[in-house]
Image: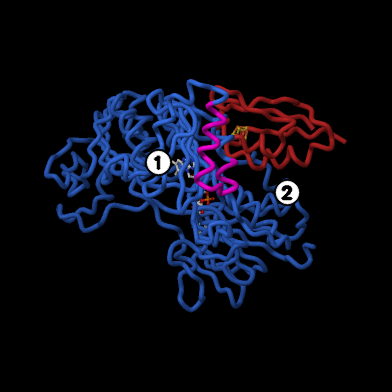
Chain colours: A red, B blue
Amino acid sequence: MHIVVDTDRCVGGGQCVMAAPEIFDQNDDDGTVVLLRADPPPDASAAVREAARLCPALAITLVEEEQ
Amino acid sequence: MSATVGHVVVVGASAAGVTVADTLRDEGHDGRITLIGAEPERPYDRPPLSKDVLAGTREPAATALRTHTHYEDRGIELRTGRTVVSADPTAREVQLDTGETLRYDVLVAATGVGPRRLPLGLPHGQRRPHRLAGVHVLRTLHDLAAFRTDMLTAHRVVVVGSGLLGMEVAATCRGLDVGVTVVSRGPAPLHGQFGATVGGKVAALHVEHGVDLRSGVGVADLTEARGRVTGVTLTDRSTVAADVVLVAVGSDPHTGWLADPMRGLDTADGLGCDAYCRAAPGIFAAGDVARWHHPALGAPVRVEHRMNATEQGICVARNILGAAQPYAPVPYAWTDHYDARIQTYGFMGPRHQFAVVEGSLTERRFVVVYGMHGRVTGALAWRYPKGLRRARELVAQTAPWAEIHNRRRTSAAMSTTTAATTTTSLHSRGVLR
Ligand SMILES: Cc1cc2nc3c(=O)[nH]c(=O)nc-3n(C[C@H](O)[C@H](O)[C@H](O)COP(=O)(O)OP(=O)(O)OC[C@H]3O[C@@H](n4cnc5c(N)ncnc54)[C@H](O)[C@@H]3O)c2cc1C
Ligand code: SF4
């Protein structure tokens, strides 16, 4: 799984950070998402999916690798 | 699992409805899902309609909630441009405007809300206000196209209503250098949402950006010439000339299709549900239309915010699949005005206790918390997202009000400047006025 974030869309509420704190952070200035790990370990993928689903701004896109 | 769930019919194809459908698929339902939406477009996101899409910096097409092939790929039967006209919970059927009847095993109401119109009985003439050219509402892409075209060539837009939608539109119009008058029945914009102090800050910000703000008055009448609006007359008898009027006076839940006393559903204000977002056996509700019993608050609530549509959609899908999960969110919302982003968690209003916990009101970068009956119920950040995350804890725990003092002592130890600007700012609204 590969994560792409669109910082222009991000509304800075931090739902992604609450769902997957090892993968997402926010900058101090305006709360825009900061991607800590674009390629999360397999055991984080459930949390990352939850983060993407929760994001109210559709700012998180997940690219699933071909099996 | 899905053998017991059967055919799920979701009425309303927007943020809440799409989330219900997706979550059902992702979490094990392999049976039939039908998603029915009255609008002709594929599901799209509404918050940008008063912000960057109105400003012209984002294409309307970029508001799509999912990719074009998403629904087909997941076997979600999406039917756009179709309205459900009634439901029969006994037969477990819904009727479509096409005359078609659809049987369901589980029904989800995700029909949202529609804009309230100006009262039809305005004294002026026979023409109803919303039939005049130049008078608009803003809820859909269709509304947006009509309003934006008119607004771009306007000298002055009158925004009737000073809630979130009205004030965001005012800010975006000012950004395009269009003259704006806001007619606010309350003492300040967003007063009903955030209380007197933050409302006053919002008022000052808009006035600085050139908004002509008329507080404490309503619209008495519209003036017209040859079928086109030419201005508004206010309840204080003053007049404002305008070529465009945006009516943003709140919204009403779309429950007409369920509102038959014979069906035994509670549609007094949205569709009434229990703590599991269930209105009746096999009937759930999510998003703006859902009024449910919030277990932590012990009261019925209905939330018209984007984040709730997603969170409640997830919860409803899981409850359809048997999770038996009470829905007790700490609702998150945001609103953008010029360079200021205001973000909130929880519940707040003009009658709540109020205290600044970080930053400073005068510097317009702060976090405030709200309380009721000695407990913290909400937090609001003005250009201070990190601070809001810290305050969210207090809201999530419904912390005793006294605890915010400890909080402030801690932040004083960390930062003397913060403490200096916050020590005098604990007031209830009564003290402030
Ligand atoms: C301009 C604008 C700006 C906003 N900005 C913000 C913001 O900054 N922050 C924030 O938190 N929230 C914001 N919101 C609110 C947010 O968009 C809503 O909370 C969210 O859209 C609710 O989603 P929903 O799916 O519950 O309902 P809706 O988005 O209202 O969707 C309901 C859908 O159901 C359809 N429908 C209704 N009746 C029927 C029927 N009988 N049959 C079939 N279909 C039907 C409707 O046509 C509609 O498409 C904004 C809203 C607007 C309009
Ligand atoms: S959840 Fe989405 S909008 Fe919120 S901070 Fe994360 S990326 Fe940004």
State the SS at label 2: loop
Instruction: For label 2, count other residues whose C-alpha is less than 10 Å away and answer few (under 14), some (14-19) or many (20+).
Output: some
Q: Residue at x 73, y 48 (%)?
A: B74
Label 1 chain ID: B
Query: Residue farthest to the left?
Result: B237
Q: Is residue A6 visible?
A: no
* Rendered position, B242 above or below B412: below
The stretch of residues the image draws in magenta is B393-412
Percent x, y of residue A25: 66, 28
Query: Residue farthest to the right?
Result: A67
Q: Which mark is residue B164?
A: 1
Residue on which disc 2 sits? B74
Q: Is residue B95 left or right of residue B33?
A: left
Closer to the chain start, of discs 1 and 2, is 2
Q: How many marks?
A: 2
Q: Is residue B57 left or right of residue B1?
A: left
Percent x, y of residue B268: 43, 66
Mark 1: amino acid: Leu
Label 2 chain ID: B
Q: Residue at x 27, y 37 (%)?
A: B182
Q: Is residue B21 magenta?
A: no
- The overriding secondary structure of the stretch rendered in magenta is helix
Toward the viewer: B248 or B335? B335
Beta carbon at label 1 within 8 Å of ligand 1: yes
Q: Residue at x 19, y 42 (%)?
A: B232
Mark 2: amino acid: Arg
